[in-house]
Amino acid sequence: MDIKNIVVVSPMYNELKTLITNKGIQKNFRFLSEENFTKNDLLWADAFVSFNTKKDYDYSQVKWVHSLGAGVDRFLFKKKWNEEVLLTRTICSFGQRIAEYCLSYILKDIQFHDEFQQLKVHKQWKPKTPKLLNEQKVMIYGTGEIGQQTAKILSLLGVQVYGVSLSGKEKEYFKEVLPVEDHFIRLSEIDFIINTLPLTEKTEKLFDEKVFKNINNVGFINVGRGASLDEKALLDALHHEHVRFAVLDVFAEEPLPESNPLWENRKVFITPHISAVTTPDEAVDCFIETLSCIEENKPLHNKVDITKGF
């Protein structure tokens, strides 16, 4: 594949420009903000590099599209895609970052941080024995690179980790992996649910009333995609104590509107999509590696399967 002209569209386009320029890549580049990106830039380009496709342009005229994030739902979800256009995604430290993010909230819960803080406010001395990680059962939805790295870190600390995937194929670090149609089997014994799934038509609103009615007093952590969650069903599950608390880093609408009732619920912890941030250095390293593999006709480990949506 002959790539000469590359347009890079990102809020951090200046940082990317500096890093890529310093690498000395012999290509023609245009570095733009999302607001300044136009159809003419796309007509000029052989390759398009961005987090998403906010503008409804025809991306089939380029040869290669590279996502600066791990997810590609903004390119594929409920959209037509020309399969002749190569689509790749960024793979870097997302798994490590998400694993540590999830671990922090699990530890916070089993060590009773919030309860002890409330006791401090009221100057009450009431000992309570913290739980152990090796007593916990976690169900991770998504057994790809991010899910597997999360499973690795948790399992090495003694957590019993179960997985759910579209295929149900066994993976290292998971005690058992269930196909998504059978995921109800283990739910009644699970202490924490972690969603790392990409957004596809099969995962849209996967976490709905039916799922939450099958769990009891569970900690729910969503670091996958916001549209995989039925927010109304979650609020109802929190009210009926099927869900003990929820940690939400991703939302169907971002930024989360001030009118959203999730803000007001004391059992909901909200973070602004920071569990797996793409740093400029990591974005550039993955982009350059992918470009090199394309030009040298080497296998691409970050190529997206258009039919699967990830």
Image: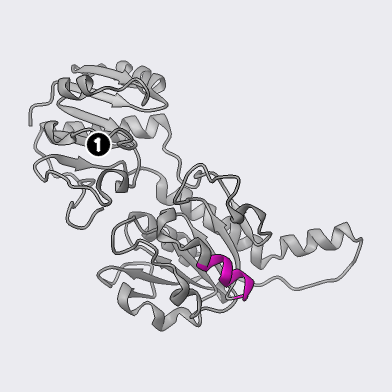
Which residue is located at x 44 percent, y 77 percent? 210
Q: Which of the 4 quarters of the picture holds residue 262? A: bottom right
Q: Disc 1 designates what residue?
A: 66
Tell me if 270 is positioned left or right of 183 in this view: right
The location of residue 298, given as percent across then percent down, is 12, 40
The location of residue 96, given as percent across then percent down, is 45, 50
Q: Which of the 4 quarters of the picture holds residue 168? A: bottom left
The location of residue 52, given as percent across then percent down, is 32, 37
Residue in the foreground of this view, choosing between 150 and 199: 199
- Work out whether 100 lies above or below 212: above
The location of residue 221, given as percent across then percent down, is 52, 61
Could one spot residue 179 in this view of the protein? no
Could one spot residue 109 in this view of the protein? yes
The structure's colour scheme is one colour
Judge whether residue 239 is colored magenta.
yes
For the N terminus, the quadrant is top left
Which residue is located at x 22 percent, y 24 percent? 39
Residue in the foreground of this view, choosing between 101 and 263: 263
Three-letter amino acid code of the residue under disc 1: His
Tell me if 138 is positioned left or right of 122 in this view: left
- Work out whether 308 lies above or below 188: above
Tell me if 60 is positioned left or right of 234 in this view: left
Q: What span is colored magenta in the figure? A: 233-241
Judge whether residue 141 is colored magenta.
no
